[in-house]
Amino acid sequence: MISKSKFPPALNFNAMLNRIHKQLEYPLPVTTITKKELDKLSSAFYTKVLLPKCGIIRTFPLRFRSLPSHYFGLGLHDLYLEMQIKKTREIIQNYGQSTIMGEQLQYGLETSQIETGQQVFILNVDYKNTQCWYLTLG
């Protein structure tokens, strides 16, 4: 709708920050996308449609889009960082709770502990001194 709208750039920018970007952030906790894929997706989406309608040149560097406006950025959240934060928040809020998600998280972490052969709880392992198969894949 924004690509065909006749709204002024300021309103389009407000819609981008408060509606569209929020809709992109919403499914992030349940997705697994690499940083490269997410940057490619967001770059194509913003560059082709949103930035020109907001009065911003298409070639505005991707790394400056997440900077606050007082540092001459656009103030957009880095989607990859947001995905990691939201996943961490889900673990903290739900682990140990008697909910479906809490039980699934506990099951998954206990399975990881068994698969890696750890004798202590997997989140308490000192990863600096541990050579595990999932750390070497990194």
Image (cartoon, rainbow, N blue to C red):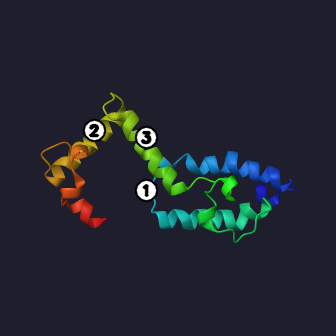
Q: Residue at x 52, y 62 (%)?
A: 38
Q: Earlier in the sequence, mark 3 or mark 2?
A: 3
Residue type pointed to by label 3:
Arg
For this orientation, the residue located farthest to the top is 98
The residue carrying pointer 2 sits among few (fewer than 14), some (14 to 19) or many (20 or more) residues within 10 Å by Cα, namely some
**Seen in the image, is 12 located left or right of residue 137?**
right
What residue does disc 1 label? Answer: 32
The residue carrying pointer 1 sits among few (fewer than 14), some (14 to 19) or many (20 or more) residues within 10 Å by Cα, namely few
**Seen in the image, is 29 located left or right of residue 51?**
left
What residue does disc 3 label? Answer: 89
Query: CA gap, disc 3 to disc 1?
Result: 15 Å
Q: Residue at x 43, y 46 (%)?
A: 87
Do the residues bearing badges 3 and 1 touch, measured as CB atoms within 8 Å?
no
Q: Earlier in the sequence, mark 3 or mark 1?
A: 1
Q: Callout 3: helix, strand or loop?
A: helix
- Which quadrant of the view contains residue 138? bottom left
What residue does disc 2 label? Answer: 106
- Which quadrant of the view contains residue 74? bottom right
Q: Residue at x 26, y 61 (%)?
A: 135
Q: Position of residue 43 (x, y in %)?
A: 62, 66
Query: CA gap, disc 3 to disc 2?
Result: 15 Å
Do the residues bearing badges 1 and 2 touch, measured as CB atoms within 8 Å?
no
Nearer the camera: disc 3 or disc 2: 3
**Seen in the image, is 47 located left or right of residue 7?**
left
Q: Position of residue 36 (x, y in %)?
A: 49, 67
